Amino acid sequence: MANLSHPSEFILLGFSPLGELQVLLYGPFLVLYLLAFIGNTVIIIMVFVDTHLHTPMYFFLGNFSLLEILVTMTAVPRMLSDLLAPRKVISFTGCMVQFYFYFSLGSTSFLILSDMALDRFVAICHPLHYGTLMRGAVCAQLAGAAWATPFLAMVPTVLSRVHLSYCHGNVINHFFCDNAPLLQLSCSDTKLLESWDFVMALAFVLSSFLVTLISYGYIVSTVLHIPSASGRQKAFSTCGSHLTLVFIGYSSTIFLYVQPGKAHSAEVNKTVALVTSVLTPFLNPFILTLHNETFKAVLRGQMQRLKGLLQAL
């Protein structure tokens, strides 16, 4: 395969260096994946069915939970099947499709995080205008732009990978078609592509991070001027879970992708990608709901209603 410029398939090494021990990873990873799927699905259902959660804050929260499900679906099921497969092969087309959806959905999740920060900024800093500034049409437009923009912007990025010459083999040292391992297989000049990738990271990751930081700068300044301690505590409690998501999501992504070139080793990339694609989607439902009294009350109410229906049957 060393002389092929356009391989028909790629071999994903995944966790092959572990040998037969990689089978032991299947159970824990499957449990984490299923719990992440169930937890985020519960959030989406609650936001959809309960009128108490039909607010901008929970609208964006539902979008974020949907993105968590979709992002993990692009990489984790494939990773799980490869843990049990003797030969881990993905077609060239399948690799490009996975690349496109993983990075499009990932970019969308950061834009939704910035939308959530804007929502909290308006709610705390401009409460009298909240109903007007964050009306349904505005929220739909913000969410629509967050979904559409990355999917459009990623088209030239994927097409550029399609037209690369892959003359350094077809073995990807990762569990999915990540950016750096693909570029390492190319014998084409990738300096322009790496610069483009850096611009994309600036556009979606750092710009949304900047919006989030500015929003919370104003939020903290406003909250500190609230005279009552209970008022300050209540304001901070509505933002705590979101700030935790911001820290986890941005720290790992900036570490991996917001840099020109291929800076980290394959093992470091795999480890950090594993945390972002398996561990954090599992933790996020707990982070989002643990200190959210409104959501917990709604969940308890729905569980009581379901229990009553089952008893009636």
Image: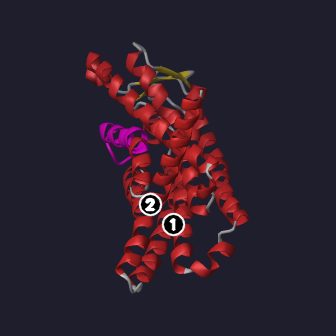
Q: Quadrant of the C terminus?
A: top right
> Is 229 on the left or on the right of 136, as rendered?
left
Q: Nearer the viewer, residue 210 or 56?
A: 56
**Outermost residue, top direction?**
86
- At x 42%, y 24%, the residue is 80
* Count of all numbered marks drawn on residues in the image: 2
Q: Is residue 273 magenta?
A: yes
Can residue 137 be seen here? yes
Q: Measured from the top left, where is residue 195 in percent x and y?
A: 50, 55
Q: CA distance from mark 1 to mark 2?
A: 8 Å
Q: Nearer the viewer, residue 69 or 293?
A: 293
Instruction: State which quadrant residue 266 falls in.
Output: top left
Q: Which residue lies under the disc numbered 2? A: 242
- At x 69%, y 68%, the residue is 135
* Three-letter residue code for mark 2: His
Instruction: State which quadrant residue 61 falls in.
Output: bottom right
Q: Is residue 40 magenta?
A: no
> Is 118 on the left or on the right of 183, as rendered?
right
Give the number of the disc on residue 236. none
Q: Earlier in the sequence, mark 1 or mark 2?
A: 1
- Main secondary structure along the magenta-highlighted residues: helix
Q: On screen, 54 above or below 103?
A: below
Q: Secondary structure at mark 1?
A: helix
* Three-letter residue code for mark 1: Ala
Can residue 178 be seen here? no
Q: Measured from the top left, where is residue 87 in percent x and y?
A: 42, 15
Tags 1 and 2 in contact by the CB under 8 Å rule? yes
Q: On screen, 235 above or below 307?
A: below
Q: Which residue lies under the disc numbered 1? A: 117
Q: Which region shows up in magenta?
A: 262-281
